[in-house]
Amino acid sequence: LSSWSPDNARLTWAAFDGDAVVPGDPEATLDRLGKKKGGLAASLRVAALWQMGDFAAAHRELDAWTPGDAMDRTRHARWAEMLAFDETGADGLEGVREVAKEITDDDARSRQLTSLAIEGARRAVDRGEPVLAAMAETRRSLGRLPTTTLGFMARNLTPDNVFRAFFVASCLPVIVLLSLARP
């Protein structure tokens, strides 16, 4: 899960301008965005302003942003929720999940829902609630997503695959004994 976030950031920047290098700080992000508006640029700008703690500027950017497709609406809802959560403490992730379910591309929807699951788990930990079950389910879904940084082992080392490997390994001694016992 920890490898997924940087991978997702690289994919986002590659989708934005073709360069998968993630800026090192919010100021560098704003410089790279320049005067581009709307869509992914608006989402990245709001993220940078949020990281800087400039909530007023982030709200102005959200107000000026008119999301088009379901992915844009999800990004917009996510940042509106994040700002509201930081300002009021009211958790609205479930509303964002409902918007994300409208995304027709399976991988894009899974990425958004995974991101929301991670944020929900972070908040649950802050409240002292258990999150292992939710994070295990999130990890299973990551095994189905194409990534740029997760290697073969990281992608396939899901709980289901570990169970399968142990099951096969536990059957091998029986198979060997049966094959040796044959005349």
Image: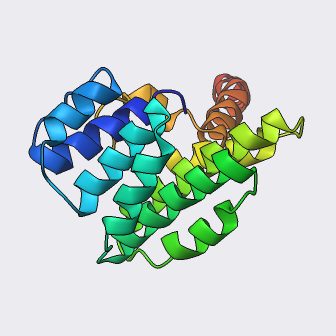
Judge whether residue 144 can be spotted in this image. no
> Is residue 179 rendered to the left or right of residue 129?
left
Judge whether residue 170 can be spotted in this image. yes
On the image, the x and y values in percent for residue 139 come to: 60, 42
Residue lying at 12% horizontally and 49% vertically, measured from the top left: 35
Residue lying at 32% horizontally and 67% vertically, measured from the top left: 65
Give the quadrant of residue 104.
bottom left
> Is residue 106 rendered to the left or right of residue 160?
left
Give the quadrant of residue 133.
top right
Q: Front-most of 66 and 15?
A: 66
Q: How is the image coloured?
A: rainbow
On the image, the x and y values in percent for residue 39 come to: 25, 63
On the image, the x and y values in percent for residue 74 come to: 45, 67
Placement of the N terminus among the 4 image quadrants: top right
Residue lying at 28% horizontally and 45% vertically, measured from the top left: 12
Give the quadrant of residue 13.
top left
Q: Is residue 27 above or below residue 138?
A: above
Placement of the C terminus among the 4 image quadrants: top right
Q: Front-most of 66 and 162?
A: 66
> Is residue 85 rendered to the left or right of residue 3?
right
Q: Is residue 2 above or below residue 18?
A: above
On the image, the x and y values in percent for residue 77 come to: 50, 66
